[in-house]
Image (cartoon, rainbow, N blue to C red):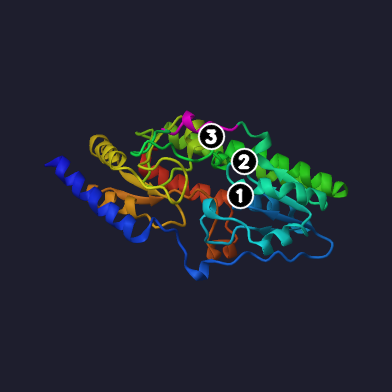
Amino acid sequence: MKSIKILIIMIVIFGLILAAGCAVDTDPKEQGPVSHETVEGKISITATLFPQYDFAREIGGELVEVSLLLPPGMEAHSFEPTPKDIVSLSKTDVFLYTGEAMEPWAANIVENLKSQGVLVVDLSEDIPLLERDEHINDQEDEDGHEDGDYGVDPHYWTDPNMAVIMVDRINTVLQEADPENSTYYTENTEILKGKLIKLDQDIRNVVDHSKSNTILSGGHFAFGYFAHRYGLEHMSPYEGFSPNAEPSPKSIASLMETIASTNAQAIFYEELADPKVARVIAEETGIQILLLHGVHNVSIADLESGKGYIDFMYENLENLKIGLGYDE
């Protein structure tokens, strides 16, 4: 009877997937790139994803004008810049991108941008990148094809310690672009690094005082670096990071069996995507469904509110307290 029930649930889940194609949030109100207009006298910076956008505005303060290339509300993995975006990039002073594993399209434009005087910064260059098979079960699908993602996990910013490396690099870049204000950038950098170090300590405290060490995800799991840093296990029915990927029946069944055997309290879902799989599993198993925000991108409302990387990570930590069974 148990296997029949799981089969029925999987049929429901795949019906939802076929009906909507695992679509991400495409509300027209959530689309449209942030303005790339620059203010005279300020260093113009364009960032591909929200973490470096947020760090750059924290470090640069009133001396910079930072633009987010990724339109608010758009799923990050499926984004490619328009010709208009590329023209805007050629007019910026500094271009911050995550790396070719996250933005494969960047390889085709960086040399041209450099030739036009843009300071191009690949933030992954100073990061000890994790191979995907270090924390992701990189198995072949049912047709015998391996997942087509890059061999490394691009989501290094989910580990606050990697965020510190990003912050130091951005500080160096701004000092290079504007040496007269080096002290200003360094002071802002130290303040931000202090917050990131405190975040790291708070995460360790929660992990050390939690009953479980396993994060159960109903979406594309972007917290490999986070889990690796804090000694956590994780489980997701998805393999890889593509928004078009579909979970296998075997993976869904395995996740549901884990929930039943471990008395798990919550299953997590990702931002800016309809959590169909997580929602159905939560309804059938009776556990909570909670957001684990990967901070790739944000909604227009969150962007306008001024929320930053650290705000999102602390919200994640509150939800992890529930999911991991935190006991003060």
Mark 1 / mark 2, whichever is N-terminal: 1
Q: Nearer the viewer, mark 3 or mark 1?
A: 3
Q: Are marks 1 and 2 in contact (CB under 8 Å)?
A: yes
Camera-side residue of 311 and 115: 115
Q: Which mark is residue 151?
A: 3
Camera-side residue of 32 and 103: 103
Q: Which residue is mark 1?
A: 51
Which residue corresponds to the image point at 64% horizontal and 58% vertical from the top-left?
69
Q: CA distance from mark 3 to mark 1?
A: 22 Å
Q: CA distance from mark 1 to mark 2?
A: 8 Å
- Callout 1 amino acid: Pro
Q: For mark 1, give the secondary structure.
A: helix
Q: Quadrant of residue 154?
A: top right
Work out whether 93 lies above or below 214: below
- Callout 2 amino acid: Ala
Q: Dot 2 surroundings within 10 Å: few (below 14), some, or many (20 or more)?
A: many
Q: For mark 2, give the secondary structure.
A: helix
What span is colored magenta in the figure? 129-137
Q: Which residue is mark 2?
A: 163
Work out whether 206 lies above or below 177: above
Q: Residue 257 colored magenta?
A: no
Q: Residue 135 colored magenta?
A: yes
Which residue corresponds to the image point at 63% horizontal and 45% vertical from the top-left?
98
Mark 3 / mark 1, whichever is N-terminal: 1
Q: Position of residue 110 (x, y in %)?
A: 72, 48
